[in-house]
Structure formats: structure tokens, C-alpha cells
Amino acid sequence: MPNKWTEDSSKHFIAGGLAGIIEVCIAHPFDCMKTRVQIGQYNRIIECLKSTIKNEGFSGFYKGLWPPLIIETPKRAIKFTSFDFFRRAFCAADQYLPEWTRFSLAGLFTGLTEALLVCPFEVVKVRLQSELNIPLSMQKSWNSIALQIIRERGFGTNGLYLGVGPNLWRHGVWNSCYFGIYHNLRSFLSNSFSTENDQKIGLFFRFSIASFSAIIANLANIPFDVAKSRIQGPQPSKDRYYFTTWQTISLVQQHQGFLSIYRFFSKLFFI
């Protein structure tokens, strides 16, 4: 007979997989534009939008779709399952850890696990998304690009694991912030206002906290997302220009201003 943890993990696996497929299909055009702005190919989202439609057609927004589509289902499923595992592990160590840290730590380790899984797929995705003025139908397949990277640079940090450093920061910080804020706020406010007793109020209550948690997580995550795109994308010179997470962030801020990292965030809203 399966135990409760196995049953819960199976539910998390299925729910995470289905959510991942839907999210990728809807969000990929925005992800493509975000990547192109982050690596400096365009200054504004509206400029990227017009140029892509003119030179590549609407299908250009779906360049690099297959790598995240393939990995998103197991990634999302593993995220749900991993968080459940780490949450139980840290909650079992309640005599050593303050209660408010447990969900953040569980999110952190979940993010690190996720980052190692997705990094090769991110490298291929960014390579495909950054190819401008080439129709999707004329582009090399994702697996051809992956094999080319392996032949030329191998599996290491110059090949399929290029940019693994900012990937670890990106996923670790996002998940730590999101799960830490969400679960701590939910616990605190539920105890204070008893909103969970009313199903309708409880649903709105959880949605509001989840949205707030995601906003804070994204704000904390943006510098590392920009660094990842810069390292994995085309370099501004023949030699590699961006190497490590903090070196990349420092260079972007040095040449474009202290708040330049967050200009990429604002461009997604004020087009």
C-alpha cells in the first residue's frame, strides 16, 4: 500500500507537469522577447515585437520552444516533489532551525536542484532565441544545436553547462523567496484572521499571497536572470566577455548604470 507521502508526491508530479506545459505554451513569446532585450539585441520590447514580426513572422516568438517544453514538465514536477521532500526534512529538524527559515531553506535547495536540471536546456533555448532574422522553418533543430555544442565545447561550464552559476543563483533565490514568503505569510495571516475558514475568501487570500510572493521573488531574481542571458547569449566581441555571475552584473551596471539591471524589468511593462 502506498504511504501518504508517495500519494502526495504523485499528485504533485502530475499537477506540476500539466501546469508546466500550459505555462510554457502561453509564456514563451514573452520569454523570447525578454531574452532578446536582456542580451542587448533590442532596447525596447515594442522594438523587439515589431522587428520579430517583420523579419521572422509570429512564429519567430516560438524559437527555442522545444527545450523548455521538453524539460518544463519534469522540472515543474520535480520542483513540487523536491519542495515537499525538503520541507519535510527541514521541518523534522525543528529543534535546530527557527520556524520561519524552514520554507526558505526548502525553497533554496529545491531551486538548486531545479537549476542543475534545466541549465543545458536553457543554453540551447537562448542560442535559438538569439538568432535574429532567420525564419523558424530555416533554423536548426534544438537537438542539432545541442549536439553541436557538445562536439565543440562538451558538457562542462563552457558547453551545455555554460552559465550554471547564475542559473544556481537564479533558481535558488527565486524559490527561496517565493516559498519562504508565501508559506510564512499564509501561516501568519491565517492564524491572525482565520480566512481559511471561508473557502471563497481563502482562495482569494492564497492567490493574493502567491502573487505578492512571486513579485518579490522576481525582483530578487532579475539580476541573476540578466547575468544568465548575457553569459549564455551572443557576446559583444569575438572573445568571451561575460564569465561569472557577479562579474557580469558588475559590467552591466558599470556600463549602463547602477539601476540598469532593473531597466530590463521595467521594459517588460512600460514598452
Image (cartoon, rainbow, N blue to C red):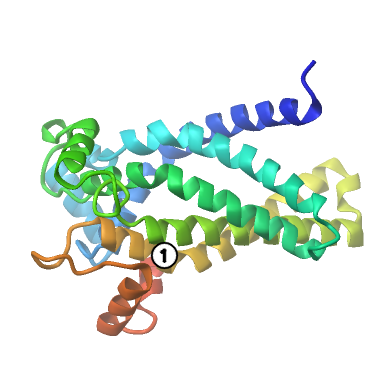
* Residue 18 percent coordinates (x, y): 54, 29
Taking the image as drawn, is residue 75 in sight? yes
Residue 96 against residue 109 in the figure, above or below: below
Which quadrant, please, contains the C terminus? bottom left
* Drawn side of residue 237 relative to residue 251, left or right: left
Write down the quadrant of residue 209 in the picture: bottom right
Q: Residue furthest top?
A: 1
* Residue 79 percent coordinates (x, y): 57, 42
Residue type at mark 1: give it. Phe
Q: Residue furthest left?
A: 238
The residue that label 1 is drawn on is 224
| Residue at x 23% of width, y 56% of height | 233
| Residue at x 19% of width, y 38% of height | 145
| Residue at x 41% of width, y 44% of height | 118
Write down the quadrant of residue 245 in the picture: bottom left
Which quadrant, please, contains the N terminus? top right
Q: How many marks?
A: 1
* Residue 65 percent coordinates (x, y): 32, 37
| Foreground of the two, 206 or 243 | 243
Residue 261 against residue 234 in the figure, above or below: below
| Foreground of the two, 258 or 99 | 99
Q: Which SS class for mark 1?
A: helix
| Foreground of the two, 195 or 161 | 161
Residue 136 against residue 118 in the figure, above or below: above
* Drawn side of residue 268 relative to residue 104, left or right: left
* Drawn side of residue 60 relative to residue 190, left or right: left
- How would you rate the neighbour count of disc 1 (Cα within 10 Å): few for under 14, some for 14-19, many for 20 or more? many
* Drawn side of residue 66 relative to residue 207, left or right: left
Taking the image as drawn, is residue 57 in sight? no
